[in-house]
Amino acid sequence: MLELRAVSKAFAGPDGETIRAVDRVSLTVAAGELVALYGPSGSGKSTLLFLAAGIAQPDAGAVLFDGHDLASLSRRAAARHRRTELGFVFQSTRLVPGLSAIDNAALKLMAEGATRTEARRRVAPLLERLGVVARAEHRATQLSRGERHRVALARALSNDPRLVLADEPTGSLDSQRSQEVLALLAEVCRERAIAVVLVTHDPAGAAVADRVQRLRDGRLTETTGAVAPVAAPQLR
Ligand SMILES: Nc1ncnc2c1ncn2[C@@H]1O[C@H](COP(=O)(O)OP(=O)(O)OP(=O)(O)O)[C@@H](O)[C@H]1O
Ligand SMILES: [Mg+2]
């Protein structure tokens, strides 16, 4: 479903130096597969997610969704792709401060044309599953950081996306809560065959992942996890 082919993205640093935020990364994620991405701060995790989403454009390499290069889409088609097929959880959550939890979760469905009542009705079960339904009418500013992360996750899942890109969706949850939310994310994604790339610092991420990838200085360094690499046939 998602394929990154030798994708690179560099930034100019303050002294004109080149920062290779993402350096020739290749990665494929299939429907229903959950890939956990680990790496130290500054290793390029968020940049990689922005590239995978088509929010940022690579300097080199290609990002393919269902075999189509995102770079070949018109602006409109790219916007539509992001709106209908992606669920993105920003590291900073990006909730609208003055809106309630449930209205924040409902925003994406409303952007797609649902009425407020209909959108609220559809996201309520997600808030319930994520354990924040009791806070549904609280304004975003009145929520704890962990609650805001869960509302952002509900919003990302609300439109039944095919790919979820989640940037530390449990960044501020205690480990018990974090495990619950990650297990839930994995469950929802397997149920609906959603492909997931999950940036996390939490070791619990590895437990729910099919595959673990590590990023260091913009390079993927290793892959481990439940899916064993298929051995190449021996040619003699
Ligand atoms: N817009 C930008 N302009 C210049 N440099 C940037 C920009 N965005 C990211 N960088 C640099 O690229 C590198 C990768 O940043 P990125 O945000 O992807 O890291 P990260 O792995 O998500 O880190 P963290 O765990 O702290 O969120 C860092 O060195 C960062 O300073
Ligand atoms: Mg980041």
Image: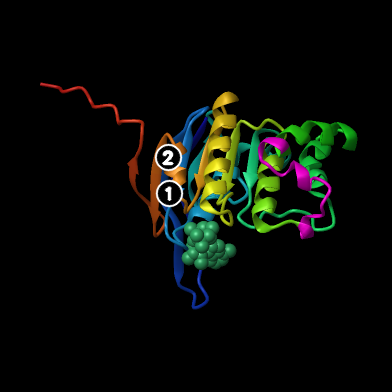
User: Disc 2 marks which residue?
Assistant: 207
Which residue shows up at 80% across the image and 45% down it? Answer: 136
Q: Are marks 1 and 2 in contact (CB under 8 Å)?
A: yes
Find the residue positioned furthest to the left: 236
User: Disc 1 marks which residue?
Assistant: 203
Amino acid marked by disc 1:
Pro
Q: Give the image quarter of residue 115.
A: top right
Which residue shows up at 80% across the image and 58% down it? Answer: 97
User: In the image, which disc is placed on residue 139?
Assistant: none
Whole-Å distance between the Cαs marked 1 and 2? 7 Å
Tag 1: Cα neighbours inside 10 Å, few (<14), some, or many (≥20)?
Answer: few
Q: Position of residue 68 (x, y in %)?
A: 56, 31
Magenta residues span 128-142
Q: Position of residue 163 (x, y in %)?
A: 59, 35
Amino acid marked by disc 2:
Ala
Asked which secondary structure carries label 2, the reply is helix
In the rendered view, would you say 94 is above or below 30? below
Q: Say whether residue 129 is magenta.
A: yes
* Mark 2 residue's CB less than 8 Å from ligand 1: no
